[in-house]
């Protein structure tokens, strides 16, 4: 992260706080893999007394650091995901940019836990666009995603009452990439110790929110079918 970006962030903070009585201000955030974050801004009136301050330009500051985060993301030597930026009333500042594997693991775990719901929601929308209708036309579905030799295949069946219908749709690239990334993270990446090996995901869609315990099955197969 270059000095110009840090000076810009410092100037924004100093300008907004010029009517305040303060000694130190701290901007803190942790970036997820996608670059999202929940920034905090703390203001100190002395070395001890602090309060969370509603900085109007907090997301402008966040965008400055996010730009640097994305630029450094692929470089193991300069990458960071945790930011602590301290500005003092005498216009000096210091910054700490660090990489925290535990934050990466937590973010990936949170995302992996909602992946099946995300897939289900996208697929329902896709089926509607493809002319299969909504819950008036089908009440439940069984969607099976199988990964073999780094390729994803899809089988889908929807039911109107008890009458099954095989669905024929082309999965969009973003959905394929999302499922393959989920597979890689849980089988080989950060979450391999928290997931049983799998190469097939089955979603039993009730056409709305999934029950993670009842509606989802991960399994490891050796032969498709």
Image (spheres, rainbow, N blue to C red):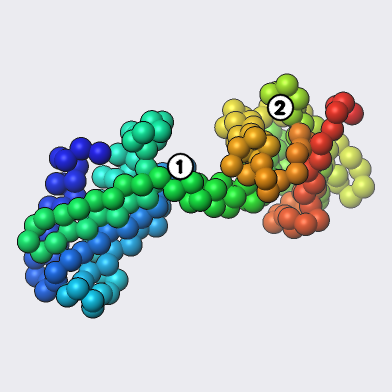
Q: Residues within 10 Å of mark 1 (few under 14, many from 20)?
A: few
Disc 2: which residue = 152
Residue 131 against residue 16 in the figure, above or below: above
Q: Residue at x 19, y 42 (%)?
A: 5
Residue 4 against residue 105 in the figure, above or below: above
Residue 143 visible (yes or no) = no
Residue 54 falls in image quadrant: bottom left
Q: Is residue 71 left or right of residue 129?
A: left
Q: Is residue 44 left or right of residue 184?
A: left
Residue 65 visible (yes or no) = yes
**Quadrant where the C terminus is found in the figure:** top right
Q: Secondary structure at mark 1?
A: loop
Question: Which residue is at the far bottom?
Answer: 49
Q: Position of residue 4 (x, y in %)?
A: 15, 40
Q: Position of residue 163 (x, y in %)?
A: 91, 43
Q: Residues within 10 Å of mark 2 (few under 14, many from 20)?
A: some
Q: Is residue 214 left or right of residue 15?
A: right
Q: Position of residue 2 (x, y in %)?
A: 20, 37
**Quadrant where the N terminus is found in the figure:** top left
Question: Which sits earlier in the primary sequence, circle 2 or circle 1?
Answer: 1
Q: Residue at x 20, y 53 (%)?
A: 94
Q: Position of residue 19 (x, y in %)?
A: 9, 70
- How many callouts does the rendering have? 2
Residue 149 falls in image quadrant: top right
Q: Secondary structure at mark 2?
A: strand
Disc 1: which residue = 34
């Amino acid at each position: 992260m270059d000095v110009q970006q840090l000076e810009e962030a410092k100037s924004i903070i100093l300008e907004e706080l010029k009517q305040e009585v303060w000694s130190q201000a701290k901007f803190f955030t942790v970036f997820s893999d996608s670059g999202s974050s929940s920034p905090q801004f703390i203001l100190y009136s002395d070395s001890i007394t602090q309060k969370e301050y509603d900085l109007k330009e907090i997301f402008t500051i966040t965008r400055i650091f996010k730009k640097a985060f994305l630029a450094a993301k692929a470089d193991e030597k300069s990458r960071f995901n945790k930011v602590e930026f301290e500005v003092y009333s005498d216009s000096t500042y210091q910054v700490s940019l660090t990489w925290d594997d535990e934050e990466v693991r937590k973010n990936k775990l949170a995302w992996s836990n909602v992946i099946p719901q995300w897939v289900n929601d996208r697929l329902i929308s896709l089926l509607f666009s493809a002319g299969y209708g909504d819950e008036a036309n089908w009440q439940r579905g069984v969607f099976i995603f199988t990964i073999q030799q780094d390729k994803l295949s899809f089988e889908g069946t929807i039911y109107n009452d008890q009458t099954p219908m095989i669905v024929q749709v082309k999965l969009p690239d973003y959905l394929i990439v999302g499922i393959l990334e989920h597979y890689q993270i849980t089988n080989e990446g950060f979450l391999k110790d928290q997931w049983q090996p799998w190469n097939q995901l089955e979603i039993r869609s009730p056409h709305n929110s999934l029950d993670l315990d009842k509606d989802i099955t991960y399994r490891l197969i050796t032969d498709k079918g």
